[in-house]
Amino acid sequence: MKKKCRAKAMVELFGSLLVGVIILTMAIAYAPALAELSNYNPQGLQATTLEQILVLPDEEIDLATAILILSKEWDASLNIKESLEEINKMALEVRVLIDTEDDPERIVALINHYLFENKSYAYVDYPSRSGFSVLEQKALPQVIKNKKGDCVGLSLIYLALTERLKLPFYGVAAPGHLFVRYDNGEKKINIETTDKGKEYEDSYYEKEYELSPTNRKYNFYLRNLSKKETVGAFLTNLGIAYYDKGMYDEAIVQHKKAIEMNPNNSDAYINLGVVYADKGMYDEAMVELTTAIEIHPNSPEAYTNLGVIYKRKGMYDDAVTMHRKAIEIKSDFAQAYYNLGIAYYDKGMYDEAIVEFVAAIEINSDFAEAHRYLGIVDDAVVEHRKAMMYDEAIVQYKKAISINPEDDLSHYNLGRIYHDKGMYDEAIVEFVTAIEINSDFAEAHFILGETYYRKGEYSSAIEYYNRAMELGSSVDPTLLELLEQYKEK
C-alpha cells in the first residue's frame, strides 16, 4: 500500500518579521500548559525563526515549534497558539495512558489507539488539482483542525506528541514518503501512520519504494532521522507548495535549504530539477536529476523527469530511453507511460503514442491528460493517414491521366485532392481541363467557382457559379450577392 504525499497549493505568503512576533507571543501564551510537562523544556520552545532552530543541538529542538514556524511563514492565518495547546493537551492525555514499565509494543499500541481511534486522526491524500494545498495535509495546524493528514502530516503529529514525552520515536524517510519508528536501541518498530500505525518491516518499504541495500545509499532513506533532518524533509514539501503556486524562485530557495540539511535526499534534487526545468534552466535541471539518480539509482521519478527535459531539448531518442527506464523500474507508473506517449507523439510516432496513452489510462482511468492526448493523437493519426492517402491518390490519378488524358473524372478528382490540400492553382488546372473535356460537367464548374472564391478572385468565382446553376447545381443566392459586392470593391 504505497502512500505518496502530493497535492496543489493556493495560500498566502507572509512576512518573516511578523511571524517572529507572533511566534514569540505564542510561546509565552502556552507556557502554563507546558508547566504540566515539566520534564520537557528544550531551548527550541523559545525559537522564533528557522535560523535559531538550526543552530541548536538536536536534543534542544522542539520539532512541533519548528514545523509551526515554517507553516506560519507560508500562511499567516494559521493559529499557532491553539495548535501548540492541543499538542500539549494530547501529550498529557497520552502520558496518563503509559506506564514506565510498559514494553515497546504496548507503548506503540497505546499511542496508535489514542491517535487513530480515540482522536480519530485519519489518512487522506487529496488528488492533484483538488483545490487543497500541499500543506493542507502536512502543516500541523491544518492536520489538527481537520484530524486528517497525509504521510507527512500524520507522522509529524505523532512525533510532536512523543517528543514531549521524551520517548524514542523518529521520523523515517522513503522516496516521496515519511513514516515513524520506535527505536530504544534494543527494539525497533516501524509505524505506518497512513495505515493507523500498522507495523511494516523495512523489506516492505524497500520493495514498495524501489530501494535495496545493493542499489542505494543507506545514509538517508530508511534510517532514523534527526529532528533537523525531519525539518529538512518538511522543507522539501514547502518547496513543492511554492512551486505549485508558480513561485519558482521561492521554491528553489526551499529546496536548496532542504538539500543543505539532507544532502542525500533524492526527492529534494528531483523537485529542484523540476523547478529548474519549468524555468527553462535545462542544464541545471539535468544536474539535479542526475544527482538524484546517483543517490537513488532506482528512482522512476528521476528518470521520467529527465526524459521530459530531453524531450523539451528535442532529444527524443534519449527521452524515450529515460521513460522506458522509469517503466522498467516501476511497471505501474502511469505518469511515465504518459510521458513516453508524449515523446512518441512529438516524434510523429502516433501508433506507439496511442499504446502508451492507453497503458497510462489502464493504470489510472482518471488520468485526464492521458485521455485528452489520446484524443489528440487519434485526430493526428486520421490527418496523417488522410495526407498519406492523398499523396497516394495523386500518384494513382496522375497514372490514370497518363493512360487516358481525356478522362474528365480523373482530372476532376485530382483537382478535388489539390483543393483539399490548399493547392488551389494546381486544382484550377485540373478543373479547367475537366471542363474542356466535358463542358456540361456541373460539379466541376461549381468546385472551380469555389476554388476561385477561396483565392479571392470573385469575378471568376461568379462566372463558374452561374454556369454551375445553369447546369442544375444549387448555389446559395446570398453567396452570389456577397460576391457581387466584393467584385465591385
Image (tube, rainbow, N blue to C red):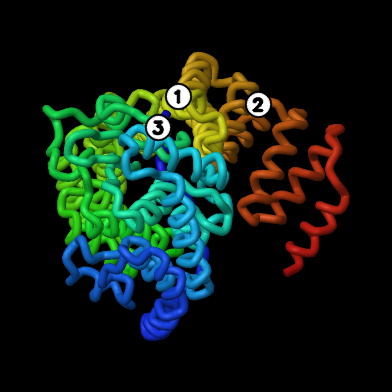
Q: Farthest residue toward the top?
A: 403
Q: Is residue 334 left or right of residue 201?
A: right
Q: Is residue 331 visible?
A: yes
Q: Nearer the viewer, mark 2 or mark 3?
A: 3
User: Which SS class for mark 3?
Assistant: loop
Q: Residue at x 70, y 33 (%)?
A: 444
- Establish if 224 lies above or below 411: below
Judging depth in this view, the residue of 387 and 190 nearest the camera is 190
**x, y (%) of residue 310?**
25, 44
In the picture of the structure, the residue carrying the numbered disc 2 is 437
Amino acid type shown at disc 1: Ala
In the picture, the quarter occupied by the N terminus is top left
Q: Which mark is residue 57?
A: none
In the picture, the quarter occupied by the C terminus is bottom right
User: Which SS class for mark 2?
Assistant: helix
Judging depth in this view, the residue of 228 and 206 nearest the camera is 228
Q: CA distance from mark 1 to mark 2?
A: 55 Å
Q: Residue at x 29, y 59 (%)?
A: 231
**x, y (%) of residue 21?**
40, 85
In the picture of the structure, the residue carrying the numbered disc 1 is 359
Amino acid type shown at disc 3: Lys
Query: Which image quarter: residue 222?
Result: top left
Q: Is residue 175 left or right of residue 241?
A: left
- Establish if 400 lies above or below 160: above
Q: Is residue 424 visible?
A: no
Q: CA distance from mark 2 to mark 3?
A: 74 Å
Amino acid type shown at disc 2: Ile
Q: Around disc 3, counting alpha carbons within 10 Å, would you say few (fewer than 14), some (14 to 19), or many (20 or more)?
A: few
Tags 1 and 2 touching, CB below 8 Å: no
Q: Residue at x 86, y 38 (%)?
A: 474
